[in-house]
Amino acid sequence: MLPILKWQQSYQLDQNARLKIKMKYREDDLEKEKEYWNTIKNYALQVIDGLDLTKPLPKLLEDVSKRLKKLDTSKINHSKKNDIIY
């Protein structure tokens, strides 16, 4: 059995560097940031609601993919993130 190795960028262990990257993409208004993540959560819940978890994984992933393609993402707004392009 081969050993598992993981390489990390220097910023991955530096908490200050990680915070700087996070802040680059965080809304200036914390209420808007919270609203954004609530919207994302609601979309995620819509996708997984009612999935038949007894199906084989490939079929389950196919169902999730179909649901994602049907989502209307026009309500997802964030001033520092790009629009979703299909």
Image (tube, rainbow, N blue to C red):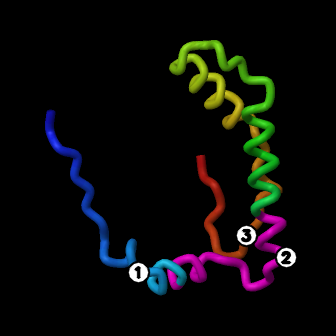
Q: Residues within 10 Å of mark 2 (few under 14, many from 20)?
A: few
Front tag of 3 and 2 = 2
- Considering the numbered disc 3 on the image, is that residue within a helix, a strand or a loop? loop
Instruction: Decide which of tag 2 and tag 1 comes sooner along the chain.
Output: 1
Q: Are marks 2 and 1 in contact (CB under 8 Å)?
A: no
- Considering the numbered disc 1 on the image, is that residue within a helix, a strand or a loop? loop
Instruction: Identify the amino acid type marked 1.
Output: Asp
The front one of 12 and 3 is 3
Instruction: Identify the amino acid type marked 3.
Output: His
**Residue 75 quadrant:** bottom right
Give the total number of marks visible in the rendering.
3
Q: Position of residue 48 (x, y in %)?
A: 73, 33
Q: Provide the residue span drawn in magenta.
A: 20-36
Residue under the point 15% across and 33% down:
1
Q: Is residue 5 magenta?
A: no
Tell me the CA gap for discs 3 and 1: 26 Å
Circle 2 residue:
31
**Residue 66 quadrant:** top right
The rendered magenta stretch, by its main secondary structure, is classed as helix
Residue under the point 65% across and 29% down:
64
Circle 3 residue:
78
Of the numbered discs in the image, which one, if any, rests on residue 62?
none
Tell me the CA gap for discs 3 and 2: 12 Å
Does 42 appear above or below 31? above
The front one of 53 and 44 is 53
Q: Position of residue 79 (x, y in %)?
A: 71, 75
Is residue 77 found left or right of 21 in the rendered image?
Answer: right
Circle 1 residue:
14
